[in-house]
Image (cartoon, rainbow, N blue to C red):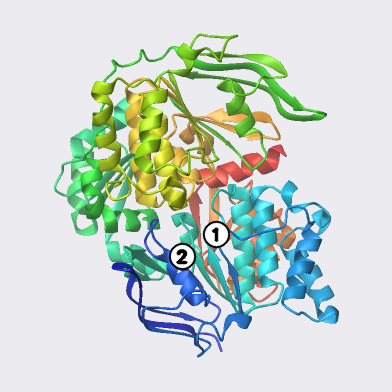
Amino acid sequence: MLNEPIIEVNNLGKNYGSFKAIKNLTFSVNQGELFGLIGPDGAGKTTTFHILGGILPPSCGQVRIFNLEPKQAKLQLGYLTQQFSLYGDLSISENIDYVAKIKNIPASKYIELKAKYLDLMKLTKFSNRLASQLSGGMRQKLALCCGVISEPNLLLLDEPTTGVDPISRRDFWDVLANLADTGITIVIATPYLDEAERCTKIAFINQGAIYKTGTPNELKADLALIKFEFRGNYEQIKNIHDKFVNNPYVSNATIYGDKLEILTPEHHKPAMLAEFTSADIDFTIMDINLDDVFTLSLKQEYVNNTQAKYPFVNPPVLKDQIAIAAYNLSKNFGSFQSVKNVNLEIRYGEIYGLLGANGAGKTTTIKMLCGLLNPSLGHVNLGNIQDNLKNLELKQKIGYMSQKFVMYEDLKVIENLKYYLGVYNVPPKIQQQKLDWVVTVFNLKDELNTLTGSLPGGWKQKLSFAASILHEPQILFLDEPTSGVDPFMRQLLWDYIRQLANQGTAILVTTHFLPEAENCNRLGFMVAGELVATGSPSEIKKGQQLIELTTSDTQKSLNVLKMHYEPWRVTIFGNTIHLFLDNINDTSFENMLNNVAVKILSNRIIPFSLEDAFIKIIETAS
């Protein structure tokens, strides 16, 4: 029965010696809910999942799943851990077969289930492909397929989309909504707050304790804030920021590339409107999102970190000159052309975002640009050096953070940091200053003597980022630098990226989290190895709009609209449907829904997000 509690957690605690990993957790999850457990690394999410999955016993409190102890309920649930193991030398089909045998699914029933979920995950035509040859998004869909093949009543998903491109993430969440509509209860942890918007209910957890619970709309309404958005070049929005950042009515002010967002309490709206009007400043009022809720909720706990400015020692780099350039850059691996005739120029002081789906050629392009791979055709100009990119003097001016964690896992954190200071010839007299900054900003005081390999994924990301910028690089390559980190830390990392750019560093960054791409001055979109679109975030989104629908049956609306429109034009977003039409005045969707007895409860036009723009560009260029 819908709304009947499936999970009941009361005063749950887990201790590791004297350390309290989770403290007095109390929450419930109802049948058919898509429940999000949201929090930073080390907040207690995975420990909570281990207890719910019957892997760990609690230290205190009670957990009931289907009114049973977690160990007794294990056969009724599917559990995808962060390190869910697929067998790379088995095909998609063989991986599912293996799980089905473990779960003792009767052969007569299994044939039907396998066909059903391969179709739902859009994996049918790839069923003979080896798991080792799958993209990140396809691997996650295969993992989910293995998790649901036994048709569990409860599905536990621990950060299933970390590192997955926006198209695959959107497909993944549409599948989750479909599963929830069938009555499967889903509990998910995610570091992406735009994904949390799609949950029916969420709980924010930090330092082992839950501090906010509710629907996304309830949590946003509780803030009682108004968001003002300003757009322009960096100097313009920086002037507005500096003018209002210390205004007593301002709760938060953040610069993102060519955009500034200012949050102010609703009851101060008239006063702020008057101030903006008197200053002759154009603005747009935007909707509050869960990133705002999360950031403001934790702001006081991180305030000391935000005040730790990067300790610049070297003089500023001369801006505006070309730092990174590619001319007809191509790369072949045998008969496969990974990168095709890429042309780009990035100047000192500029943040350039290179975006694309998994396998688009972004990482291969970065490796050629920084001299790790030789191009098959074309050439690179890096720091005014064209041919000898392995030049040691040039390498000292470059910072590089790769997708794959490359620090020494058998060294302590402090040993890794000192190693990188030495590799980049940071003068001994300023090494302690650099170390003090890292320890303060990333809260590493208690982790300096921890083996690096034992750190959570998000902590490893922070450490990699710090190591890549300790030497004040003039040119910086960041390949998905914020993958898996919480929203506040993501904002903090971008604050330091902007500080480096303001000092003159040329920065090329890739990301699968499109809201953060707003921080870039310019963007380039790659599809199948080609650069197909470029521009500032505002230019990329200019003139694009969506229709947001609330209907009497969200899942039925999604299914019907996807039958009539290209699937990428329609997605479920919480309890709403987002629909992209070439003609925003086209109302034919109303008849489509009326014909199946679905009522439209609300209908409004909303602006494109960068994720919407990304999906449109990628899908129409494919």
Toward the viewer: 442 or 584?
442
Q: Is residue 445 above or below residue 214?
A: above
**The N terminus, quarter of image:** bottom right
Say which quarter of the image contains residue 370. top right
Toward the viewer: 95 or 386?
95
Q: State left or right for residue 330 relative to residue 488.
A: right
Q: Residues within 10 Å of mark 2 (few under 14, many from 20)?
A: some
Q: Residue at x 62, y 47 (%)?
A: 583
Q: Position of residue 180 (x, y in %)?
A: 59, 74
Q: CA distance from mark 2 to mark 1?
A: 9 Å
Q: Position of residue 201 (x, y in %)?
A: 44, 71
Q: State left or right for residue 391 relative to residue 622.
A: left
Q: Position of residue 472 (x, y in %)?
A: 35, 24
Check residue 82 in the rendering and tell me which mark sits there, or answer none: 1
> Farthest left residue?
248
Toward the viewer: 81 or 201?
81
Say which quarter of the image contains residue 289. bottom left
Is residue 592 something one can see in this rendering? no
Q: Is residue 23 above or below residue 494?
A: below
Q: Are marks 2 and 1 in contact (CB under 8 Å)?
A: yes
**The C terminus, quarter of image:** top right
Check residue 330 in the rendering and tell me which mark sits there, or answer none: none
Which of the two labelled residues, at mark 2 and mark 1, occupies the earlier sequence position? 2
Q: Residues within 10 Å of mark 1 (few under 14, many from 20)?
A: some
Residue type at numbered disc 1:
Gln
SS class of the residue under badge 1? loop
Residue type at numbered disc 2:
Thr
Q: Is residue 4 above or below residue 189?
A: below
Pointer 2 residue: 46
Say which quarter of the image contains residue 532. top right
